[in-house]
Image (spheres, rainbow, N blue to C red):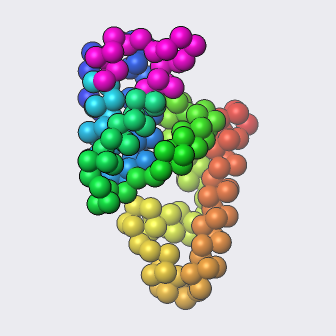
Amino acid sequence: MKLPDLPYPEGLAGYREGVYRLLLFLTHNIEAADELTQETYAVALSKGVNPQKGENYGAWLRSIARNLVLKHREKRGRRWLVFSSEIMELAERRFVRAGVERDDQWESRRNALLSCIQKLPEAGRTLLLRRYQLGESVKQMASDIGIEPRSLSKRFMHIRRSLLDCINSVLRGE
């Protein structure tokens, strides 16, 4: 999803995609993530783009986003899937540790992923396509292939591990 290029102050502009991806992870809802990303930036701009001393823009924006998710959950009640505040903080820490806070870092990882997918055997690429683009369930795919769902889940685990290793190698320039 491409967010519109708005006249954000320079320090904030590079964090839009990362804020959106974090919100998408926390809400599991594209429309909510879009809305909350815009609200996050509206709040940041209304506060004068002035993160607390010692904080970077990414941490400041994520803090605003987390608070908005909690408020949004209160408004929506149980109809809306979202994690507890403790889980959200844990997810944010992992998000930051992944080192993809800025949009350019996301783009590098995305390009590495696309390159690594092309290196997979055809069978692995087909499984990924069916699962992640077409949204087929592991149970249905396993039935079609004639294996146990547990075995297919293990295959996916191996494919994901292989992709992660490849992505890290590409990013290190190996």
In percent of the image, x 46 and y 30: which residue is there?
63
Image quadrant where residue 36 sits: top left
In percent of the image, x 51 and y 41: which residue is there?
110
The single residue placed furthest to the right in the displayed view is 174
Image quadrant where residue 45 sits: top left
How many numbered marks does the figure carry? 0
Whole-percent x, y for residue 77 in the image: 29, 55
Q: Is residue 34 left or right of residue 100?
A: left
Q: Nearer the viewer, residue 122 or 134?
A: 134
Q: Nearer the viewer, residue 38 or 133?
A: 38
Is residue 58 shown in magenta?
yes
Q: Is residue 168 left or right of residue 40?
A: right
In percent of the image, x 60 and y 67: which residue is there?
156
Whole-percent x, y for residue 6 in the image: 26, 21
Residue 174 to residue 54: above or below:
below
Which quadrant of the rendered structure holds the N terminus?
A: top left
Whole-percent x, y for residue 107 in the image: 48, 34
Q: Is residue 142 visible?
A: yes
Q: Is residue 115 visible?
A: no
Whole-percent x, y for residue 78 in the image: 32, 60
The magenta segment: 43-61
